[in-house]
Amino acid sequence: MVQPVSRPIRGRYAPSPTGRLHLGNVRTALLSWLQIRALGGTYVMRIEDVDTGRSRPGFEATLLEDLRWLGLDWDEGPRIGGPHGPYRQSECSERYAEALARLDTFECTCTRKEVRAAAAAGLGTEPVYPGTCVAGPTHLDRARAVRWCAPDQTVTVTDGRMGTRTENLRRDAGSFLLRRTDGDWAYNLAVVVDDGFMGITHVLRGADLWSSTPRQVGLAQALGLQAPAFTHAPLLCGPDGEKLSKKHGAPDVAALREAAEDPRRVVAWLARSVGLAKEGVRTASAAELVADFAVEAIEDRPLPPSPDPWRL
Ligand code: GLU
Ligand code: ZN
C-alpha cells in the first residue's frame, strides 16, 4: 500500500447540464460544498457536458445561478477560470485523447442492444461487455467506439459512509467504454482524468455512483493518477422510496428561485432532510452549517409522509 502524500484539499461539484437541478441534486451539491469548506479546501465547479447530445448551455447558466442563490460558491470554475482549466468537459478533448493513448484499448462496433443481449449481468448498472470485439471490430462498416482492456486486477475502495467495495476489474467491470461510437468521451474516462488533472482529493457525490467507483479507481491507477477519497451520500427519494424525479412533483430549484422563495428556507429543508439541522430549524444559510458539518453525521432519512412532502 502506497502511503498517501498529503495534498492540498480540493473538492468539486460536477453537474451535467442536461436539465434543471432538483432538490436532490442541490442536496448533494450542498453536502459536497460543506465537506470542502469544513476542511478549509478549494472548491471547483466542473461542468460535465461530455454528452453533447443532451447538454445545453442554457442549463449550465441556470444551474450555476441556482447554486449561487443557495449560497454555494466556488474558487475555480468555467467562467472565473483557475489554474486547472478548462472547467467544461466539452473543452477538454485533448486531455482525454492523451489519456486514452496511454491505455490498453480496443475498438468496438457493438450496439448497446448487442452488448446487453450478449452480456452476463454485471454488478454495475451497465452490463459487463462480453468481449465480442477484443480481437478486432466485428462490423467494419460501423462507427467505432473505444473500450478499455480492463486488467485482471482486484480493486478495493473504502467509502466515507458506505463501507468497502471490492471488484475484479475484468470480471465485474469488464471492458467499459472510454469513447462512444458518436465520438463523445465516456463519463468514466472524463471524470477520472479530470479528478486527477484537477488534483481533486475529496469527492462527495450521489450513492448511485458508488457502483462505478472501483472501475474509476482502477482506471485512475492505470493512468498513474491518485484517486480521491470518496463519500457517497444518500439520494433524495420521493415518498414512494424511489429516487427523486419529475413524477414526484417536487419543484425544481430554478422554479423556487423564480417564485422568490427564501433560499434560507430551502437550505434548512435540505439540511433537515439529512439530519444536519434539527426539525425546528426553518431557515439556515449554507455558511452557517459549515462549523458542525461531518460526513458521519449525514443520515439517510425517508421523507415524512405528508400531503405535501416538498413544503419548505
Ligand atoms: N456528472 C455526474 C452527474 O451529474 C456526476 C459525476 C460525479 O460526481 O462523479 O451525475
Ligand atoms: Zn464490440
Image (cartoon, rainbow, N blue to C red):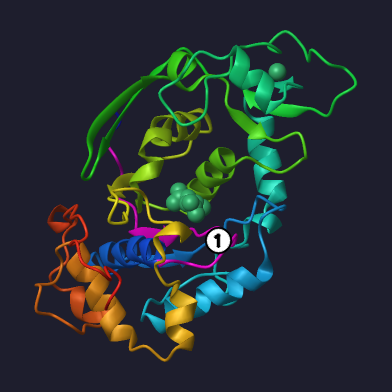
Tell me if residue 115 comes above or below residue 195 in the rendering.
above
The magenta stretch spans residue 59: no
Tell me if residue 96 comes above or below residue 177 in the rendering.
below
Quadrant into which the C terminus falls: bottom left
Measuring from the top left, give residue 261's x and y in whole percent.
Answer: 37, 88
Residue 135 lies in what quarter of the image?
top right
Residue at the far right: name it. 141
Q: How many marks?
A: 1
Q: What amino acid is labelled 1 in the image? A: His
Circle 1 packing at 10 Å, graded few (<14), some (14-19), many (20+), is few
Question: Principal SS element in the magenta part?
Answer: loop
Determine the residue positioned at 19% across, 75% down.
289
The magenta stretch spans residue 11: yes
| Side of 116 relative to 75 (left or right) | right
Q: What element carries label 1?
A: loop
| Side of 71 relative to 89 (left or right) | left
Q: Give the range drawn in magenta.
A: 3-22
Measuring from the top left, give residue 75's x and y in whole percent.
Answer: 44, 73
Residue at the far top: name it. 135
Residue 182 lies in what quarter of the image?
top right
Quadrant into which the N terminus falls: top left
| Side of 46 relative to 259 (left or right) | right
* Foreground of the two, 28 or 236: 236
Measuring from the top left, give residue 25's x and y in whole percent.
Answer: 41, 62
Determine the residue positioned at 49% across, 87% down.
258
Tell me if residue 145 comes above or below residue 295 in the rendering.
above
Determine the residue positioned at 44% across, 84% down.
257
The residue that disc 1 covers is 84
Measuring from the top left, give residue 41's x and y in whole percent.
Answer: 32, 65
Determine the residue positioned at 34% across, 48% down.
242
